[in-house]
Every structure is written in structure tokens, then in C-alpha cells.
Image (cartoon, grey):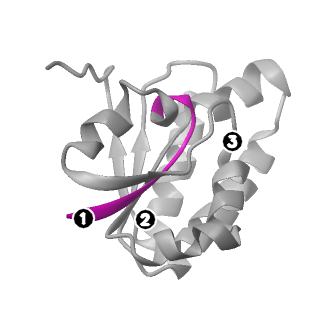
């Protein structure tokens, strides 16, 4: 069975969300924490207790955008420059693990959403990571 490390926010934490589908096909190590930005993902990648799971991962998935836009527009008025710098740190760290990485961009139409998506696009291309941009809401049907 394949090993997947899952990073992200609330969409990765929800029991009936992304992790549920992934668990049908792989062993999922969920390092996600809802309501957090890419700095939390970076923290999880650096934690000593997570190193074995990361080194044994066949794929690392990180879902993003929604909380970054909330922090930019609503919660903290986080600047686009800081968001970009934090994403750079995250993507550079993901690159060093020499594992396949998939960045899942979930839809969230809010002020400056296209700018943040373009940040992800630029960095994914720069570091050679896989970028999946969902154009509409994903509905899990069983």
C-alpha cells in the first residue's frame, strides 16, 4: 500500500473530506491542521517526529489557498508579499525531500484569489511540483 502525507487546512482535517477518499487507496498520515497557513505545513515538515513518515511517503499532498485568502482579506490583513515569502519557504522545503508533491488548489473566489493562485503556479513550476487547480467544488459521492 502507498503512503501519502497530507498537509493543509480544514478540508484535509474533515473526517468525510479529502482524507476519507485518500484512505481508500493509501495509508494516509494526516499532518493537517484547520485554520492555519503554509507556516503550519512548514512546521509539520520540520518536526522531528514527522521525519520518518515524510521519508517513507510515496506522495506528499498539500491543499491550500482558502486560509491564505482569509488571512489576507479578513483576519490579519496579511500582505501578498508575506504570503509569497511563506509559500517560498514551504515549497523550497518540500523540494528538498525529493518526493512527489501535489499541491491541490481548492476553489475560493475572493479578493486577490487569482494573484495567490498565480503565486502557487509560479512556485510549483519553479520547484517542479505538481499543481492541481480545482475550478469547482469537489463533491464526494459514495
Q: Nearer the viewer, residue 43 or 100?
A: 43
**Residue 130, quarter of picture:** bottom left
Which label sits on residue 37? Answer: 3
Tag 2 secondary structure: helix
**Residue 20, quarter of picture:** top left
Crowd rating for badge 1 (residues with CA inside 10 Å; few <14, some 14–19, many 20+): few
Q: Residue at x 40, y 65 (%)?
A: 129
Q: Nearer the viewer, residue 94 or 3?
A: 3
Q: Tell whether position 9 is magenta.
A: yes
Disc nearest the viewer among 1 and 3? 1
User: Residue 102: percent from the left, percent from the top?
Assistant: 37, 56
User: Residue 125: percent from the left, percent from the top?
Assistant: 43, 65
Which label sits on residue 2? Answer: 1
Q: Which residues are magenta?
A: 1-11
| 3D distance between C-alphas at marks 1 and 3 | 27 Å
Task: Tell me whether circle 1 and circle 3 mark residues in contact (CB < 8 Å).
Answer: no
Where the C terminus falls, by quadrant? top left
User: Residue 114: percent from the left, percent from the top?
Assistant: 52, 33
The residue at which mark 2 appears reads as 125
Q: Residue at x 24, y 64 (%)?
A: 2
Q: Tell whether position 141 is magenta.
A: no
User: Residue 53: percent from the left, percent from the top?
Assistant: 48, 69
For marks 1 and 3 on the same chain, the one whose residue lies earlier in the sequence: 1
Q: Residue at x 74, y 22 (%)?
A: 73
Tag 1 secondary structure: strand
Where the N terminus falls, by quadrant? bottom left
For marks 3 and 2 on the same chain, the one whose residue lies earlier in the sequence: 3
| 3D distance between C-alphas at marks 3 and 2 | 21 Å
Amino acid at each position: 500500500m502507498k503512503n501519502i502525507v497530507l498537509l493543509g487546512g480544514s478540508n484535509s482535517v474533515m473526517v468525510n473530506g479529502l482524507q476519507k477518499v485518500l484512505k481508500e487507496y493509501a495509508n494516509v498520515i494526516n499532518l493537517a491542521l484547520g485554520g492555519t497557513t503554509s507556516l503550519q505545513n512548514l512546521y509539520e515538515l520540520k518536526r522531528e517526529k514527522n521525519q520518518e513518515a515524510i521519508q517513507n511517503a510515496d506522495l506528499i499532498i498539500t491543499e491550500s489557498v482558502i486560509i491564505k485568502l482569509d488571512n489576507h482579506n479578513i483576519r490579519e490583513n496579511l500582505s501578498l508579499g508575506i504570503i509569497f515569502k511563506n509559500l517560498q519557504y514551504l515549497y523550497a522545503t518540500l523540494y528538498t525531500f525529493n518526493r512527489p508533491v501535489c499541491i491541490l488548489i481548492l476553489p475560493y473566489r475572493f479578493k486577490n484569489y487569482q494573484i495567490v493562485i498565480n503565486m502557487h503556479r509560479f512556485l510549483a513550476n519553479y520547484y517542479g511540483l505538481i499543481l492541481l487547480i480545482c475550478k469547482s467544488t469537489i463533491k464526494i459521492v459514495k
